[in-house]
Amino acid sequence: MIQLQSIKKSFLIGKEKINVLNDINLTIEDGEFVAIMGPSGSGKSTLMNIIGCLDKPSSGNYFLEGDDVSNYNDKELAKVRNESIGFVFQQFHLLPRLTALKNVELPMIYAGVSKQERRERAVEALEKVGLSDRMDHLPNALSGGQKQRVAIARAIVNKPKLVLADEPTGALDTKTSKSIMEQFRELNEEGVTIVVVTHEPEIAEYADRTIMVRDGMIQSSRFERGL
Amino acid sequence: MSFMENLIMALSSLKAHKMRSILTMLGIIIGVGAVIIVVAIGQGGEAMLKSQITGPGNTVEIFYQPSDEELRANPNILLQAPFTQEDIRALEQIPEVKRVVASGTKASTARIQKKLADVSVTGINQAFLQLNELNTANGRNFSTADFLGARRVGLISDKLKNELFKEKNPIGSIIMVANQPVEVIGVLEKPTGLLAFGSMEIYLPFQTWKIIFGSSDFTQVTLQAYSAEQLQTAGKKAASLLNKMHNTEKSYQVINMEEIAQGIGQVTRIMTLIIGSIAGISLFVGGIGVMNIMLVSVTERTREIGIRMALGATRGQVLIQFLIESMTLTLIGGIIGIFLGWGTASLISFFAGWPSLVSWQVVLGGVLFSMAIGIVFGILPANKASKMNPIESLRYE
């Protein structure tokens, strides 16, 4: 599914070159539930951006479902993000002027799905996350947990193989966090590969495997559940 | 992503900032409105001028311009009236000709008691009345009997009436025209219109005129054709007929009023263009306003752009989204401006008595031009949006 080969990423800050990722080698199999942990500044966000095709590595190769996407141009990367990856963010990142239903329809608009089908699939996705009674609400009228569920529905509506969640429970209370993580587990059991970036060990416990990142390198990779 | 979806999206985001959108549109509304007003009034004025110059109904005047040889042979040739009664009869035989309006004009004097005025005395045939509107403000017009009986009756212009009679009623008075008595039967209406100036004139039936001045030749001949299409043919045939009868090469000519009208049309068009371009400057300023607001909008919506890109929007799709948004803004403004300009132009022409003309070309041009402004001034903001880095945009607060 995901194969990172000696990925390096550096940024120029002023004249100084900062190496954020140093030689990352990582393989994530189909259907895995992986947590990426690390202190702030460890490079886990950059790693996440590269996995999510939002950023390109400075060197190294990234194979997503067998395709080397490290050399894709912007347009091709947009297509990969649209079709193969679903994003869930800490701040939910819903468009405030669109209803829950319209927010969920958004990725399908860029995929060129017909209006009729878009609506059907968005309703289906919202039903799946248990929000069939909140479809016509604007994000403002939803609680944090409900917003995150809308975001999850939006992430899965194009039926991607991979869902990337960046601190998905960072803005939620413990109880809501738990139900959101259970939602991810449920998705994972249906075969979707889940990668969660977090700094909370309790959240990482939901994953099958935890990858520790520190100073731009993978420090450890351990399986939590007997795989 | 279809155009319609982009349009709906653009409308909803313009609706989200109603006040801002309306104020931005105002620049375009005023600009397009001003251009429409100027063009409408300019074109209306042009049409009015043209209709006044060409006069009523398919007419063309025949001119006599002797060649150098003729002038050398007879230096006094210009003092003689160029059209004889045979000429008129021959011209009436041309199939395309409906009427031959002939008149003779002499400069002379008109006197009543001790008051004397220099006047131009025009003898007219009956066809003249059909073509030239000699409407009487006072008294009666010529009757057929006046023409056939060579009665000593005349119509005087408003200006001459003021000169000779002041406030008194002139109808029935006898005035001396070239020392011969003529009864005033009517006073002509004051001339109206842009090119009409009052002059001291007396109109007489041609036979009367002939007796007074002892001349039977006409100085002016105007042809009326059955239709505008036949006018050129009729004019050409008439000129060559007259040249043949008088044994001249091309001394008799027709003046094409259409050409003169076109010349004048050109003048008004240039005027419209100049004033229109000044109005166009306000449109340009409006366009800059659109660009400004779109730049603000792009910055404010950085996060939205990041989200859309994360969800799979390509840079091209983001570019198109913002272009269509600015185009929608200017298009709506342009359409409102067209109606506003149209209304104002109609209002102005209602009060100023000057016609206005809003042609479909102008409306179409206005619509297309306001769309073009949206695209031209929207390119920079839209380009800025499309060049954004999705990661940084998502982090933008």
Image (cartoon, coloured by chain):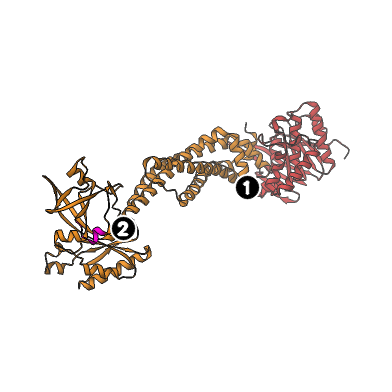
Q: Is residue B143 left or right of residue A86?
A: left
Q: Secondary structure at mark 2?
A: helix
Colour displayed for chain B in the image of the structure: orange
Residue at point 30% right, 66% down?
Answer: B235
User: What is the quadrant of the C terminus of chain B in the image?
Assistant: top right
Query: Is B148 colored magenta in this rendering?
Result: yes
> Residue B204 location, x and y as percent?
21, 56
The span from disc 2 to disc 1 (Cα, nearest Å) is: 58 Å
> Residue B55 location, x and y as percent?
32, 55
Q: Quadrant of residue A221?
A: top right
Residue on which disc 2 sits: B131
**Subunit ID for the residue under disc 1:** B
Residue on which disc 1 sits: B4
Along the viewing direction, whichever of B22 and A209 lies nearer the viewer:
B22
Along the viewing direction, whichever of B238 and B340 lies nearer the viewer:
B238
Residue at mark 2 shares a chain with residue at mark 1: yes
Q: Is residue B231 left or right of residue B85?
A: right
Q: Is residue A71 left or right of residue A120?
A: left
| Residue A158 visible (yes or no) | yes
- Closer to the N terminus: mark 2 or mark 1? 1
Colour displayed for chain A in the image of the structure: red
**Is A223 placed above or below B203 here?**
above
Q: Which range of residues does the magenta coloring cover?
A: B145-151
